[in-house]
Amino acid sequence: MNQHWRATLLTPAFTAAGGLLLWPMVGPAWAATGAALFLAVLLTHHRAHLHQLEIWFRDARADTLPAGSGRWERVFSHLSRLLRRQSQTEGRLMERIQRFEAAGAAMPETVVVLDEDNRIQWCNPKAAQYLGLDPARDVGQQVSYLVRQPSFVEYLQRSEFSQPLLLRLSPPGLEEVSLSVQFVPYGEHEKLMMGRDVTRWEKLETTRRDFVANVSHELRTPLTVLNGFLETLLDLREPDPRMMQRSLELMSQQTTRMTRLVEDLLTLSRLENTLHPSKDEPVDVPELCDHLLQEAQALSGGRHDVRLRCESRSGLRGSTDELRSAFGNLVTNAIRYTPAGGQVEMRWFERGNQPVFAVSDTGIGIEPQHIERLTERFYRVDRSRSRETGGTGLGLAIVKHVLQRHQAHLEVRSAPGKGSTFSAVFPAERMQPVVHNESLAAVR
Ligand code: ADP
């Protein structure tokens, strides 16, 4: 007989044995009454506990579980153990789900889990932000109701996911973004919809393409001119020596232009390939300003009033070559964009604790809408004026890079027809106490 039957038959057997024991002492009627009373008490005991159990089920929590007595005490303690185990398992599962959700939330990609009918099951915050989804409201919705771009709907219908799809989105509060979306089937029929923000990469790609197109364009013009002269000279049996001389001069101008362009391109590429200044040496800026003054005067050829105000004795820590190239570009521009009779002034001074190199001119000035774009490669306000004066369109791009590498920035103030001031503002930490007293002079 197994344990279950033994336990079940024990009570009637015990009651019968008790009745039989009482029989000789009190007679059959009292013995039967005693047995019946015993059974009634037992029944009441069980009914009371069953009732407690039923009530407890309405709000089944471990802390409200009744204590019980007799067999019921054991039953309730089993139940309590079961509940504890269950809540531990639930806790572990919850922790895993939370860890999964935290990992999903931390992912830089957008992630949407879709069921076999392309209904949203879950999405991470990045997906909510980029695709404009509301995790609380949109779970269970068809993804194509919410992302309505025709290319997306078609891509989803085709169910051919070997190539990613490029979506252009305008999420609220963000600039337009490009999202490369890829579907990854998993499980029975579910799909993961993963999206990567490729906006920056696309911009870089466009910049690269524009750059190649610009360089080709810049080289094509002088090459065409050179070719034209060469063909003419080859066709002439006996070229006129004066015409020959003139042609050679013009050809030389074109090769100089190409050389300048290639040099600027090489300088830019060197600057872009390393993040920090190539050197961190003391730069004697007052001395550098003296050299720049002489160069500017030579370039102006007496057509401008070129001045230097060196108001600080300090120098800078950085690369002398790079700073010479950047400051030189600012000064050259001031001369090139200032008509004869105008004034160009270089100034080296401290603004608060920041060292500043500024070049002001009384030249043609710049309309405000151009100012932000001046440091872009090949950006020119007036293309022909830039070319006539030997510009490559790369000068200010070089300035920007050099300044960035010295943690400095460029400030431009300009008024069309009145003139411009370009200021290179350096951080205080770049200041280098020097220098020769002779360099310090008010106005030269
Ligand atoms: P560029 O070789 O054409 O001078 P830069 O990069 O040095 O190229 O300058 C970009 C453009 O900024 C120039 O084409 C010109 O239109 C404008 N610019 C630069 N410096 C000055 C200045 N001092 N005054 C007026 N315009 C200027």
Image (cartoon, grey):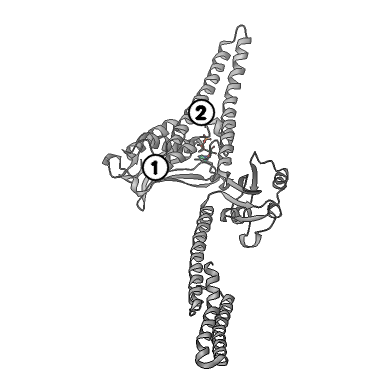
Question: Farthest front residue?
Answer: 24
Image quarter (top left, top right, bottom left or bottom right) of the C terminus: top left
Q: Is residue 136 above or below residue 200?
A: below
Residue appearing at x 53%, y 39% in the figure: 376
**Which of disc 1 and disc 2 is earlier in sequence?**
2
Q: Name the spot of residue 274 as percent of width and height, x first.
A: 42, 36
In depth, the one of 311 and 45 nearer the eye is 45
Mark 2 neighbour class, 10 Å CA radius: few under 14, some 14 to 19, many 20 or more: many
Residue 162, picture quadrant: top right
Q: CA distance from mark 2 to mark 1?
A: 24 Å
Residue 327, picture quadrant: top left
Residue marked by disc 1: 406
Labels in figure, total = 2
Say which amino acid is labelled 1.
His
Q: Name the spot of residue 50 as percent of width and height, x first.
A: 57, 79
User: Mark 2 or mark 1: which is in front?
Assistant: 1
In depth, the one of 81 and 310 nearer the eye is 81
Q: Name the spot of residue 137 as percent of width and height, x first.
A: 65, 62
Say which amino acid is labelled 2.
Leu
| Image disc number at residue 261 | 2
Q: Name the spot of residue 130 as percent of width and height, x first.
A: 60, 53
Q: Is residue 84 above or below residue 66?
A: above
**Disc 2 C-beta below 8 A from ligand 1:** no
Image quarter (top left, top right, bottom left or bottom right) of the N terminus: bottom right
Question: Farthest top residue?
Answer: 237
Q: Is residue 433 above or below residue 329?
A: below
Look at the numbered disc 1 and give the secondary structure of its residue. Answer: loop
Residue appearing at x 62%, y 54% in the figure: 171
In depth, the one of 113 and 372 nearer the eye is 113
**Circles 2 and 1: CB atoms closer than 8 Å:** no
Instruction: Decide if residue 144 is on the left or right side of residue 333.
Output: right
Q: Is residue 348 above or below residue 60?
A: above
